[in-house]
Image (spheres, rainbow, N blue to C red):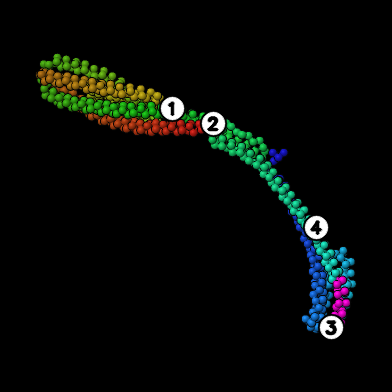
Amino acid sequence: MLSTLLIKHKIFIVFSILFLFTSILSIYSGFNQTKNISDLEFTNSNIIKPIEKLKKVSDIYAIDVVDTSHKVRNGTMQVYQGREVVESAKTRIDTEWNNFLSTQLDDSLKEKIEACKKRKIQSDQSLEKLSSILKNNDKIRLDAYVTQELYPEIEPLTVEIGELIDLLILTSNETYLESHSNGKTAQLFLILGNLLVLLIIILSYIYIIHSIEKPLNLINKNANDISGGNLKDFHIYNKKDELGILSENLKSMQGVIKNIIQKIQISTSEFENISSEVLKKADKMNRSFQNVSSSGEESASSVEEMTASFENVNNYIQDSYHSFSSIKNSMDSFLNISNEINLSIHNLLHIVDNSITETQKNEEQIKKSMDSIIEIKNQSEKISTVMGFLEEIADQTNLLSLNASIEAARAGEFGKGFSIVAQEISKLAEKSIESVKNIRTHIKNTEKSVNEGVQKVMASTTIFSTIIDRFNDINTSASTVISSLEKQKSGLETINSTISNSEHLMDSLKQISKEQMLALENVSKSSLNVSNEIQDLSFEVENLYNISKTAKDQSEILTDTVGFFRI
């Protein structure tokens, strides 16, 4: 029954019992104290005060009357002085006697008091006689009266007064004993009550200790287990009081903490796995972008080399233009060496064919190389910012290649080589646009694509070197043609007409070459910008790698921390 009560109710019951016993003791003590006070007042009014009055009467008789009579008889006191003392004593005796009679006397004293009253009347008469004798200054009669009448009349009164005093003293002793007995009883009852209250307090303390300290120790042990990471064990306290409710709440809190720790452990494990995977991917992307950066630099170098090659071609065209001017003045010998010119032209055509073939191979290699580079750019989300820029470059390149094709078509036979190059550049631009659209789907093969890009760019460098050599062969063949034309002397008019046309064509080729050079310079700048963007992306990927590494370290620390709890 008590186990279902709250602690505050238990404490209320205990203190109610203590209050009840204390109230009973207080009421009894108050009642006993009131009775003792009443007894003391009764003793004071009925015993002590009457004794005081009677004592004064007795003292007045003994001292003022008898003693004064002896002094007058002995001559130690004048008669008139004795008379005054006796008169005063008589007045005082009457006063004190009346005071005695006015006090609250016990009924048991009335008989004695009536006897004393008779004695008092006789004593008063004796005092009247003594006063008359003293007034007459009759010492002889005074001696006879004192010895024969005064003593016999006063002595019974003093005896009666003494008996009254003894009776009053006896009564006061009985009252004292009764009060003392009541006090002892009250004191004993108070001691027993205090012992009972002390016993109740001790039992209450033991009960409270049993009801509070024991469950508090269990709750404290449970709290220490939780703070120590032990979420498996729990000491149950099944009472329904506040501590039982606290124990239930602590158990619920342990369950909630246990569920949270379990979820944290699962999440930490998953987070650690994800962090490891992200770290691997970031490391792979970092290495890939480093390779991409190198490939971009090599690609930029290749474009620069292509620009240099086209500069050589431009120089060649300018030289050819000047050569044709010289040829116009030397056509007289052209017919004599026409066979050599035909042979040289065949060789030139053969060389041009070979150059076309090598250029096609170069285009293929550059295309693959650019595809690899474009695939690399998809390794990060920031590459998407470069896509539009690359598309614009491809569009401009396509437009420039279209312009080059138009100008090459105007040049006729001499512009075929540039027409082919323009077509290949146009194809390259179209392929670049297509590669830009497909670049986001190849992030997993970044490292392989980078390696392929490096190899293919190197191959393109070799091919461009071959093109330069072929153009040098063309230059040699053209020199041979010029030498042969110098030996020709016949067919001047026909050749002059042809050379004039060729001169116009070379002038057109010169303009086309300049435009192509500008286009290549733009491509070179674009390649440099792409390389810079790739370097920036490489830096961002490196930051991503560092962040992923930090996340993995933090996940390991969190795993160790959560491992402190035993579930």
CB under 8 Å between discs 3 and 2: no
Q: Which residue is mark 4?
A: 178
- Separation (CA) of disc 2 from disc 1: 28 Å
Magenta stretch contains residue 433: no
The answer to whether residue 200 is left or right of residue 507 is right
Question: Label 1 amino acid?
Answer: Glu
Say whether disc 4 or disc 1 marks the residue closer to the N-terminus.
4
Q: Nearer the viewer, residue 444 or 497?
A: 444
* Magenta residues, start to end: 136-157
Label placed on residue 139: 3
Q: Which residue is mark 2?
A: 566
Query: Magenta stretch mostly in which secondary structure?
Result: helix
Say whether disc 2 or disc 1 marks the residue closer to the N-terminus.
1
Please rate how many residues cluster around mark 2, counting C-alpha atoms within 10 Å: few if below 14, some from 14 to 19, many from 20.
some
Q: Residue at x 46, y 31 (%)?
A: 556
CB under 8 Å between discs 2 and 1: no
SS under mark 2: loop
Please rate how many residues cluster around mark 4, counting C-alpha atoms within 10 Å: few if below 14, some from 14 to 19, many from 20.
some
Please rate how many residues cluster around mark 3, counting C-alpha atoms within 10 Å: few if below 14, some from 14 to 19, many from 20.
some
Say whether disc 1 or disc 3 marks the residue closer to the N-terminus.
3
Question: Label 2 amino acid?
Answer: Arg
Please rate how many residues cluster around mark 1, counting C-alpha atoms within 10 Å: few if below 14, some from 14 to 19, many from 20.
some
Say whether disc 3 or disc 2 marks the residue closer to the N-terminus.
3
CB under 8 Å between discs 4 and 1: no
Classify residue 410 by image quadrant. Answer: top left
SS under mark 1: helix
SS under mark 3: helix
